[in-house]
Image (cartoon, rainbow, N blue to C red):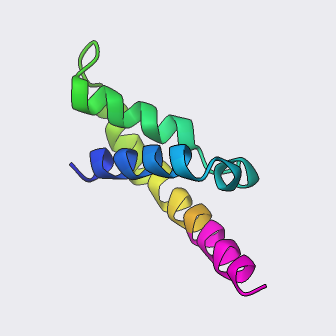
């Protein structure tokens, strides 16, 4: 369920803050939204191996990328 929530949040960020997502293109915004859609709507079944790999491998790196993007946003708001 949390991957769906992440995907929902990403969709809102992409819609409301397009410049931010473009400035942080190392974050896989579209892939996160796509994963949300696949899980939520069950397109052609869900490949649990892909979900597991995402949670085990991609998610830790994603957390680092998002922390850096958040810090960058905080730094820019201080200007």
Is residue 27 shown left or right of residue 53?
right
Is residue 13 shown left or right of residue 17?
left
Q: Residue at x 72, y 47 (%)?
A: 22
Please determine whether, in this image, residue 43 is positioned above or below residue 76.
above
| Most distant residue in the right direction | 79
Q: Quadrant of residue 24?
A: bottom right
Is residue 50 shown left or right of residue 26?
left
Q: Which residues are magenta?
A: 67-79
Q: Residue at x 54, y 36 (%)?
A: 30
Front in this rendered view, residue 7 or 60: 7
Please determine whether, in this image, residue 61 is positioned above or below residue 11.
below
Q: Report the number of discs.
A: 0
| Most distant residue in the bottom direction | 78
Front in this rendered view, residue 38 or 18: 18
Residue 32 falls within the magenta-colored stretch: no
Report the predominant secondary structure element of the magenta stretch: helix
Front in this rendered view, residue 33 or 18: 18
| Most distant residue in the top direction | 44
Q: Quadrant of residue 45?
A: top left
Q: Quadrant of the C terminus?
A: bottom right
x%, y% of residue 9? 39, 52
Please determine whether, in this image, residue 45 is positioned above or below residue 72.
above
Q: Residue at x 56, y 64 (%)?
A: 66
Q: Residue at x 64, y 47 (%)?
A: 18
x%, y% of residue 33? 44, 37
């Amino acid at each position: 369920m949390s991957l769906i929530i992440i995907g929902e949040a990403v969709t809102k960020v992409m819609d409301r803050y397009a410049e931010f997502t473009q400035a942080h293109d190392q974050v896989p915004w579209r892939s996160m939204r796509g994963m949300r859609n696949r899980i939520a709507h069950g397109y052609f079944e869900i490949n649990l191996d892909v979900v597991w790999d995402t949670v085990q491998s991609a998610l830790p790196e994603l957390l680092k990328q998002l922390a850096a993007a958040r810090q960058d946003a905080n730094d820019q708001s201080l200007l």
